[in-house]
Image (cartoon, rainbow, N blue to C red):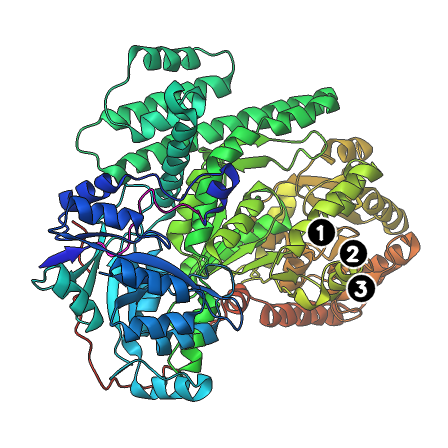
Amino acid sequence: MTRVDLHCHSRHSAHPSEWFLQRIGASESYTDVEEVYRQAKQRGMTCVTLTDHNTIDGALELVERHPEDAFVSVELTTYFPEDGCKVHVLAYDITPKQFDLLQNVRPDIYDLRDCLRENDIAHSVAHATYSVNGKLSRAALEKLLLLFNVFEAINGARGKFHNALWHDILKRLTPEDIERMHGIHGIEPWGPEPWIKGLTAGSDDHAGMFIGKAFTVVPDADRHSLAEAVKNRETGVAGRHGNHKALAFCIYKIAYEFSKSRAGANGNGGLFGLVNKFLFEEGRSGFKERMTVRRFKMGRDGKTRALGQFIEDISQSRTADGLDAEERFEAAYESLSRLTDAFFTSIATSLEKDLKNGHAERLLKNAFAAVPAIFMITPFFTTMRHLHYENRDLLEAFRSAMAWPPVQERRKLLWFSDTVTDLNGVAVTMRELATCAHRTGRPMKLVTSLPEGPESGALPPGTINLPCTYTCTPDFYTSFTLRLPSVLTSIDRIAAEEPTAIVVSTPGPVGLLGLTASRLLGTPCIGIYHTDFARQADCFIGDAGISSAIEVYTRWFFRQMDEVRVPTRQYIEILAERGLPRERMRLFRRGVQASFAVGDRSRQATLRKQLGIPDGRDVLLWAGRLGCEKNLDFLAEIYEEVAVQRGNVALLLAGDGPERDRLASRFRGDGNVVFAGRVPREQLCHFYSLADVFVFPSTTDTFGMVVLEAQACGLPAIVTNVGGPQEIVRTGETGFVVPAADKHAWVAAVNGLLDMKRDDRKDFDAMRARTRDIFQTAYGWDKVLDDMLGRTHRKPASRTRSADRPHIEPAPAT
């Protein structure tokens, strides 16, 4: 079996396409020609060639040294003249004269195709689904399929998903497909049976690390008959696909080689050179290097010590027995992840300290301290984006135009939230959605970041808990804790889940990570606007400047989303006025499972006794966070006025928060005000069943989850005409919507419901039953998940293939 890597590069490839390498001024490769040959033969390649960009200098050098098993090839850059779409075409086993001919015509892809055909030159279109200059279209793909008959099916620098997707397209082509494309574009297909495409594979290696890891196979051929096999479409493909970590380390190595070339005789010094020397050079550390590591590890600050530990870790992996390149890079990636976590944690700690001490002048300095860590992780972000840059929608549009069934890919959501175990509506929503998805087998996973401990142990089943490296609880909002997840470890874990869509419920660090992941993976991102942070900041801080800054940030954050789900129509209007695109906003309905809304009224006597509420006393209920943003002083005034007028009323507060002590002080001596503390959600339905009226005067809620829960339990609710809760209540039917600051209207609404209970008990009970029926049938978590998952699929079309392709299935790389 003949094996050859039909796509690899040497130092003669000069101009990089990767952003990081362009910025530092590096060449595309620094691999010596002889090193390419050595690695290829070591990994079992029968023949060796080079496909440098638009030059055969390296290939000629290779053939001069190894004429018996090497041949000249090239990767040609060409363009569709009608729109400038750039394409790379590989030409194999060519002469210098043929290269000159190809060079003269290569700017125009049509002229290039004609030249290849007239001179009977073996060829293959490289990484056809990768848009080299961002201009690839469905029409361009169709034209390529008419123009050429051989395509790269495994490119070692591309991801498995897109390699496989393109491979599948090539196998599915029929005579009718070619005829349809010919009718559209007027391009004469190349040769007989043009719907049968030949396949090649190559590592597309630029760094001298994966040469021969992806290769083309053909039974028993020498270098000359190999070219004939390519032309006759008789080759198969095998080997590894790319991943973002390996590709990033390739970039690191090229940058290191560039740095060495610039350093010249003085060597490659500095921290960058030391780290990369440990990564890419063989052998044990010298005395000077060991002393440098020791000096770092004994540094005064955490960042320096972490750097020393990182260098020691990669030094040990370099000298470990039995580790191949990918295993070494995996170990180095873990070490780099720990290093960047240490950097970001140190910086976040300094920022928190400066904010508390009022050292505003140091904030910028600490922000700049993050630059080295950002510089180190940037290649991993750019390579992940690079691997997913092929447009999934473009390929699906191509399949649709062919009347093929869509890729049978079950939609999978990752749902990101900074708050899951907290006492707020967002956390309740997250827990309920995750539990419902796990129970019903729906393909959704909740993603958050909590330190290991009791809190993380209370997460819903199936939750992805990303490693947490730093936590901070603001003094002005003690019920919220900001948590910083490990960046590289988290991105790696998210990518492994292969989500088809990402949902983000909070704009904190976890939400930002979700947004970043969606951009790196090329998946749509849906934002859920749960909380009006700017309005809440007004209540917490009372500083217009800070509130304005929060509003600017949240507006920027949600403008990045492909779609924004908003709990109520009222808030769609509010957000549109604040600058969010109205056309991207849709309603997001929350739910209540019917099983939750089964409160046990027979337990009322026991619960009343536990809470200290005498029988016969009317109960006004509040549930939720006891925070200043909830308008609790106004609630207290309403209760006090009703108590004066009626005398037999109690106020039950189910929840906890920073305002509890102040409210308790206000009501000291009033035995009719009961603080129940934080109530487990599974017991909250009994409180709703016990109470007579739910009173919720908050003006900052975008929805009001507790209002929905109360009504699903049949409890009439009174809410303000400001914000989202007003859309849950049906005035006069399930409760009342009352002007926010009109205390007399609030007292009248409470008295009206309590009078109905006293004087028209039958009508009051009927109202409760009607309220429960309306909200148990109108809302449900299953409906929410089905809506987000979009669980409708096109029926697969029936297709037959009229010809089979000679093909060798991919096998593990040697």
Query: Is residue 98 rendered to the left or right of residue 351?
Result: left
At x 17% / y 58%, what residue is drawn? 811
Secondary structure under badge 3? strand
Type of residue at label 3? Phe
Total numbered labels placed on residues in the image: 3
- In the picture, residue 636 is in which quadrant? top right
Q: Is residue 148 above or below residue 534?
A: below
Residue 578 tag number? 2
Residue drawn 24% across the image and 72% down it: 120
Marker disc for residue 598: none
Residue 582 picture quarter: bottom right
Position of residue 169 measured from the top left corner of the image (x, y, whole percent) = 33, 73
- Mark 2 element type: loop
Question: Which residue position holds label 1?
Answer: 555
Of the pair 594 and 316, the residue shown nearer to us:
316
Q: Is residue 238 visible?
A: yes
Q: Compare marks 2 and 3 and give the one earlier in the sequence.
A: 2
Residue where numbered disc 3 is placed: 736
Front-lying residue, 310 or 735: 310
- Neighbour tally class for label 1: few under 14, some 14-19, many 20 plus, Cα within 10 Å: some
- Identify the residue at horizontal 78%, vertical 59% (top origin): 574
In depth, the one of 407 and 99 nearer the eye is 99
